[in-house]
Image: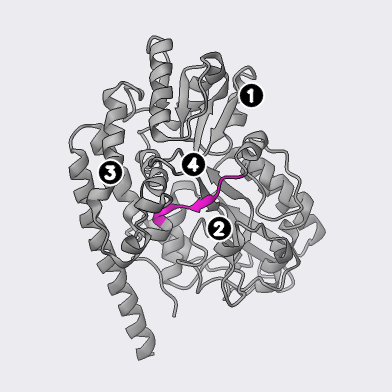
């Protein structure tokens, strides 16, 4: 059975795109092959790294060309449209949903040489109990909080390991800099940046602490959402104590590197390229990264991550052999290193010696477990939007923390019902056929 999330209404251009078909042969020559490739990569250095590998591949295999696409924010909608018509690109990024969303669409890659070198933290995400391998990991995510290591050292602030310590650290930044520095800087012009914060904090709030572990309730639909209220309450505490930027709802992500380079940010949530971008603007500012602080006494910090960028092969591609050949080429150590360094993230397979900006920080916190993204495991599809809207409304003070929990609860149950109905409809259609 092939299942997919409810198709969203998308622009006509995306519908036209979906009609193009996979593995299009642009010149009509049966001896030549054009592979379509779609990726969620957005950072220029990362895209350049992938395009460099593509160019080398095309030089080595001149009968194969690759049409690479990096549609950014429209990626998910365009892929959903193509899923609905069973016409996915030859190669595509599963962006955290290798098994749950795309599992029935991707070819098994278990016969490839690089599978023996799976990083132990990636294998459970991309390989099932039957041995099927769903995608090649270009890198792996270690998400936490980025911080101004230079500033913290100047102010003699120890790295926080609990939420309370984190708030105390931000209060010190506020007081010692006379409010000239934003202790926490949020680019809320992109509401998903706020959603990211809430999603990452949901894990230490609701999963990692032994006495406050609600995994079973979240998965079976019986979770009491009043247990979530502490998180929006904490966000409001940060706002009321003047610990976040006053323009948190309108600030743009494009401002972040410049402000950090000017020593005007304490903590922020950013992607892997952030530290390198800041260094290029001001090499005197060092950006560090730390795992998510613990919410509950006695718990440890936790990295949030796992699958970030991947390459999967569409199982019904007309050019599956050539698509798998490119994945094997991408997995060669030198090529895997280029992409890992381009994304400033650890490689997804062992034996790849990547020069990573954050290497010393990953080493410092290497004893910390990596937890999967909360929404991917415990929430129905569509809840990411709810995180974003409730978080924005909370900062705007148009809803209370209790309101935020109530909305999350209502949408959680509504989306669970919708997803179950979609699965039932797909099953009925398959049985009818």
Label ID, residue 187: none
The Cα atoms of the two marked residues, 4 and 3, are separated by 27 Å
What residue would you read off at disc 2?
93
Q: Can you tell which mark lies on residue 280?
A: 1
Query: Which residue appears at 35% of the width and 90% of the height?
Result: 432
Q: Badge 4: few (under 14), some or many (20 or more) residues near its Cα, within 10 Å? A: many
Q: Earlier in the sequence, mark 4 or mark 3?
A: 4
Mark closest to the chain's N terminus, 2 or 3: 2
Label count reads 4
Which of the two discs, 2 and 3, sits closer to the camera? 3
Where residue 17 sits: x, y (%)? Answer: 47, 60
Q: CA distance from mark 2 to mark 3?
A: 26 Å
In the rendered image, residue 61, in percent from the top left (x then y), is placed at 79, 62
Q: Quadrant of residue 3?
A: bottom left
Magenta-highlighted residues: 367-375
The residue where tag 3 is placed is 389
Q: Position of residue 186 (x, y in %)?
A: 39, 30
User: Which numbered disc flags the more N-terminal residue, 4 or 1?
Assistant: 1
- Residue 358: x and y, percent? 63, 35
Q: Secondary structure at mark 4?
A: loop
**CA gap, disc 2 and disc 4:** 29 Å
Q: Secondary structure at mark 2?
A: loop
Residue corresponding to mark 4? 301
Q: Residue at point 68% right, 47% down?
A: 339
Of badges 4 and 3, the one in the foreground is: 4
Residue 370 inside the magenta-drawn segment: yes
Q: Earlier in the sequence, mark 2 or mark 4?
A: 2
Judge depth for marks 4 and 1 and give the one in front: 4
Measured Cα–Cα span from mark 1 to mark 3: 34 Å
Q: Quick one: which residue is furthest to the right in this view?
A: 60
């Amino acid at each position: 059975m092939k299942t997919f999330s409810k198709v969203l209404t998308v622009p006509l251009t995306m519908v036209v795109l979906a009609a193009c078909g996979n593995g299009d042969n642009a010149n009509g020559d049966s001896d030549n092959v054009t592979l379509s490739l779609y990726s969620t990569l957005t950072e220029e250095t990362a895209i350049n790294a992938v395009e460099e590998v593509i160019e080398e591949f095309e030089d080595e295999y001149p009968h194969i060309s690759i049409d690479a696409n990096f549609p950014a924010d429209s990626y998910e909608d365009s892929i959903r449209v193509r899923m609905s018509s069973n016409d996915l690109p030859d190669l595509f990024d599963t962006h955290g949903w290798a098994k749950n969303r795309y599992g029935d669409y991707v070819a098994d890659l278990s016969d490839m040489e690089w599978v023996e070198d799976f990083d132990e933290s990636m294998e459970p995400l991309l390989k099932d109990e039957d041995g099927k391998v769903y995608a090649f990991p270009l890198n792996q995510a270690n998400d936490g909080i980025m911080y101004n290591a230079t500033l913290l050292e100047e102010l003699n602030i120890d790295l926080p390991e609990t939420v309370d310590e984190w708030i105390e650290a931000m209060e010190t930044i506020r007081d010692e800099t006379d409010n000239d520095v934003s202790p926490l800087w949020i680019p809320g012009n992109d509401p998903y940046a706020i959603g990211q914060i809430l999603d990452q904090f949901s894990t230490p709030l609701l999963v990692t602490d032994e006495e406050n572990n609600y995994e079973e309730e979240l998965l079976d639909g019986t979770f009491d959402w009043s247990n979530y209220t502490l998180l929006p309450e904490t966000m409001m505490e940060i706002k009321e104590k003047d610990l976040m930027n006053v323009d948190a709802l309108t600030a743009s992500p494009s401002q972040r590197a410049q402000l950090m380079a000017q020593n005007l940010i304490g903590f922020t949530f950013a992607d892997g390229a952030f530290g390198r971008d800041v260094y290029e603007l001001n090499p005197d500012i060092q950006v560090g990264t730390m795992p998510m602080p613990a919410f509950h006494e006695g718990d440890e910090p936790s990295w949030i991550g796992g699958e970030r960028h991947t390459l999967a092969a569409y199982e019904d591609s007309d050019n599956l052999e050539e698509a798998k050949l490119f994945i094997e080429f991408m997995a060669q150590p030198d090529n895997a290193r280029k992409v890992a360094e381009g994304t400033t993230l650890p490689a997804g397979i062992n034996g790849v010696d990547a020069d990573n900006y954050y290497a010393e920080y990953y080493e410092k916190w290497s004893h910390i477990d990596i937890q999967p993204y909360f929404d991917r495991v415990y929430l129905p599809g569509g809840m990411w939007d709810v995180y974003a809207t409730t978080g924005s409304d909370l900062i705007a003070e148009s809803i209370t923390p209790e309101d935020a929990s109530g909305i999350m609860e209502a949408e959680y149950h509504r989306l669970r019902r919708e997803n179950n109905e979609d699965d039932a409809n797909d099953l009925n259609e398959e049985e009818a056929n």
